[in-house]
Each structure stands twice: as C-alpha cells, then as structure tokens.
Amino acid sequence: AQKITQTQPGMFVQEKEAVTLDCTYDTSDQSYGLFWYKQPSSGEMIFLIYQGSYDEQNATEGRYSLNFQKARKSANLVISASQLGDSAMYFCAMREGRVQGAQKLVFGQGTRLTINP
Amino acid sequence: KAGVTQTPRYLIKTRGQQVTLSCSPISGHRSVSWYQQTPGQGLQFLFEYFSETQRNKGNFPGRFSGRQFSNSRSEMNVSTLELGDSALYLCASSLPTTTSQETQYFGPGTRLLVL
C-alpha cells in the first residue's frame, strides 16, 4: 500500500528565510505522481507543485521547488524567501499510478508552518 | 475560470439524520473525488466519479454514498449520521490528461458538525 510520511508536525521560520518541508513516500509502482498542497485556516486545499516519477529535473513553481530524490523516496518542498502568508498546513500527496485511470490521492499527516515576522 | 464550488459551506446535523453535500467541478473537468478530513484520521479518500460512474472507492461504510450527474456535478450523501462523521468534506476535480500529472483541484470544503 502506498504511504506518505511527513515527520515535521510543526515548523517555525523567520520571514524571508528559506524553509524545507520533508516528505518521504513508499510505493511499489514505477509510475506515480507527487503533489504538494497548502491548506490555510479557511480549509481550501491549494495546489502548489507536482513532480512525476519519470521527471528528470526537479519541479519549480515560483518560490516553490521540489527536491526529488527518487532513490531515497523523498520529495521535499522548498519555499524560498518565506512570507507571512505562507503560514498554513502543508500536505504532501501521492497519486496512484495509472494514467487516465481511477483517481486517488494518498496524503501525509501534514506540517503546520508558521512564519514569524 | 471558476474554481470548484461546494455547498453548503457549513452544516449542523444531529445523530441519525442524513445529509447531502454538493460539488460543482471546474468547467470541463469530468472527474470528481471526495475526501474526508478529521484531526484524528487526517485526509482520507471517500470515492471518485468519472462520467457518472464510480471509478474508485475508499474504505468507508455503506452509509457514505455519492453520485455524479451528466454535467459532472456530484453529490455525496451520508445516512444515519454518527458523531464521528463530523469533519471537513473536500471535493476535488480533475481534467483527464495523457500524462501522469492529473492534478486535482479542491473546493473550499463543507464543514459538517454532528451533534
């Protein structure tokens, strides 16, 4: 069974610093997708970044980048130059393998990030 | 383009009642998935619908059911509510693609409180 592990329940970071949120995964599939979502206190899950298992380069989206280490089965999210608005819960998720097949995301327990001014 | 919408946003019910939650996906999206989020269990997959057919189902009792209409809008129903059903229910939609990046976009959720 697929599993996502986020070992940091909470993190506190000074504004403008970079922060790395850890995510490790376990799967026997060769084809899979990894996602990061942000959940502010309002509850909505906001898509941040995606990494495919066959992608050779690390994904980047603005201030977000994904440090993908396939052999270690890790997909850490890096936020550069953190802002107060980055304070939220962050979830790492994995999509089960088949393309155009049944959709299901498996989520980690999340990391609560707090940015201090 | 409008995002995923969910109604109602908040709901208070009593044990034994039933509830219906609604989700309208992003225009053009044909897959709709439902998730339950609780402090104890985290985010858990309920089920997924595609072209009016349930394509995948999580490990929830039969009290939880859903359906999808021809316009891709989806509803989920919980019958005989229990206190443990209190949760944030999130709906997500996705556009079928030919790549593995079939990103799910989430709605704001419906907060259900069972008293």
Image (cartoon, coloured by chain):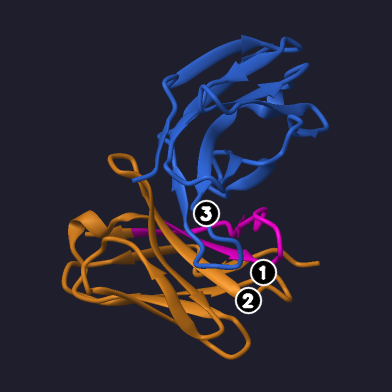
Chain colours: A blue, B orange
Question: On the image, numbered disc 1 is attached to which residue?
Answer: B96
Q: Chain of mark 1?
A: B
| Image location (x, y in percent) of residue A38 | 60, 38
Q: Is residue B100 magenta?
A: yes
Which of the numbered marks, if any, corresponds to residue B30?
Answer: 2
Query: Residue visible at 61% across and 57% down?
Result: B104
Q: Quadrant of residue A62?
A: top right
Label 3 sits on what residue type?
Gly
Mark 1 lies on a secondary structure that is: loop
Q: CA distance from mark 3 to mark 1?
A: 14 Å
Relative to residue A112, is residue B16 drawn left or right? left
In the image, A8 versus B15, the foreground residue is A8
Relative to residue A80, is residue A43 drawn left or right? left
Q: Is residue B73 magenta?
A: no
Residues packed near mark 2 inside 10 Å, few (<14), some (14 to 19) or many (20 plus): many
Q: Chain of mark 2?
A: B
